[in-house]
């Protein structure tokens, strides 16, 4: 197989440029902590009722937490914790807008833990067993659910958002280009009410995922990516290489199968494409590609103010 007509040496050169760009952007933006820093896994005290013991949350945990694996509770609590660490907890008047909400467990945990009065959930599908049903039962927060594709969403037309002085945009299921659509939506919040716009977007908290599904057309930081010396064609390759980040998570049989498959990957001259890259190097390259895309997005947000 040939990857965009690149030789193995050209591919390794691209990986080297990705690492260099990540280092440069990280220093420029002040994001110097390692991605796997355990101190970034936060657990706010307000989220404690959601935690239980074992693989699934126990009976002592919040009733919503019993319905899915405990790791999701930890992930959601950490998103909440990191957002609060950056922007503060906010008060009850905050409107929480969860994009790509799915069943709404992140938003439900957020408004019930922080006692926000308004939750707006947006997803392009309808789900059974939604968490927002439980939120409605305790009457502590108003909940609205919109079935709409993010590319068609006019955030300025959402009544609850327009009526709120502070809105937090959050997401945990925004695969690939959906993250970029969410960033565009967040930027559009600043178009509300003129001079009050700078106060309206209180905070943005998104856990990015599925970078291999990013598209050049949707990517908000195209100009920043190009300014780093990359091309639009290389964006597709960088996006594809993000899959390497998880190539070490399989079982031994899967690893052996992958190794045999990799032997058939060749460059344009028929030479082994990955002959000089170990599994660990490919994983590091995949993580760097993910980081590069997210750092470009962070720079775009910084430029938006």
Image (tube, helix red, strand yellow):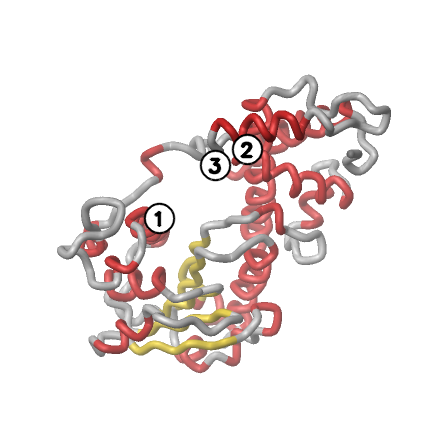
Q: Disc 1 vs disc 3: which is toward the camera?
A: 1
> Marks 2 and 1, Cα distance to the nearest angstrom?
21 Å
Question: Outermost residue toward the left?
Answer: 60
Contact (Cβ within 8 Å) of mark 3 with mark 2: no
Q: Is residue 103 above or below residue 12?
A: below
> Marks 3 and 2, Cα distance to the nearest angstrom?
25 Å
Q: Is residue 148 above or below residue 184?
A: below
Answer with mark 3 or mark 2, whichever residue precedes in sequence: 3
The residue that mark 3 highlights is 31
Q: Secondary structure at mark 1?
A: helix
Answer with mark 1 or mark 3, whichever residue precedes in sequence: 3
Q: To which quarter of the image does residue 269 belong?
A: top right
> What is the number of callouts on the image?
3
In front here: 195 or 179? 179
Kindly identify the residue that appears in the image at 29 percent across and 43 percent down: 42
The residue that mark 1 highlights is 75
Kindly identify the residue that appears in the image at 83 percent across and 34 percent down: 5
User: In this rendering, would 19 be left or right of 123?
Assistant: right
Q: Quadrant of the N terminus?
A: top right
Q: Secondary structure at mark 2?
A: loop
Kindly identify the residue that appears in the image at 59 percent across and 39 percent down: 243
In front here: 130 or 285? 130
Residue 247 bears which disc, if any? 2
Contact (Cβ within 8 Å) of mark 2 with mark 1: no
In front here: 165 or 65? 65
Q: Disc 3 vs disc 2: which is toward the camera?
A: 2
Q: Percent from the top left, x then y, of residue 158?
A: 48, 79
Kindly identify the residue that appears in the image at 73 percent across and 28 percent down: 264
User: In this rendering, would 231 be left or right of 131?
Assistant: right
């Amino acid at each position: 197989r040939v990857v965009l007509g690149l030789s193995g040496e050209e591919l390794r050169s691209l990986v080297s440029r990705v690492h260099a760009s990540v280092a440069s952007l990280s220093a420029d933006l002040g994001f110097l902590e390692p991605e796997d820093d355990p101190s970034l896994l936060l657990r706010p005290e307000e989220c404690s009722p959601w935690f239980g013991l074992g693989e699934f949350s126990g009976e002592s945990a919040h009733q919503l937490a019993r319905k899915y694996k405990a790791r999701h509770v930890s992930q959601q609590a950490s998103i909440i914790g990191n957002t609060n660490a950056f922007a503060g907890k906010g008060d009850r008047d905050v409107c929480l807008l969860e994009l790509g909400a799915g069943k709404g467990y992140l938003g439900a945990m957020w408004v019930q833990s922080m006692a926000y009065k308004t939750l707006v959930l947006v997803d392009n599908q309808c789900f059974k067993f939604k968490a927002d049903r439980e939120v409605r039962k305790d009457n502590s927060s108003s909940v609205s659910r919109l079935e709409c594709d993010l590319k068609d969403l006019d955030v300025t037309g959402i009544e609850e958002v327009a009526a709120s002085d502070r809105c937090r945009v959050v997401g945990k299921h925004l695969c690939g280009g959906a993250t970029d659509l969410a960033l565009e939506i967040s930027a559009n919040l600043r178009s509300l009410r003129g001079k009050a716009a700078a106060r309206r977007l209180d905070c943005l908290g998104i856990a990015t995922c599925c970078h291999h599904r990013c598209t050049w057309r949707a990517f908000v930081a195209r100009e920043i990516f190009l300014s780093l010396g990359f091309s639009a064609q290389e964006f597709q390759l960088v996006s594809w290489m993000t899959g390497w980040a998880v190539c070490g998570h399989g079982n031994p049989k899967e690893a052996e199968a992958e190794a045999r498959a990799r032997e058939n990957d060749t460059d344009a001259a028929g030479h082994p494409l990955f002959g000089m890259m170990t599994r660990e190097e490919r994983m590091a390259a995949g993580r760097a590609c993910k980081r590069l895309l997210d750092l470009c997005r962070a720079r775009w947000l910084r430029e938006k103010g």
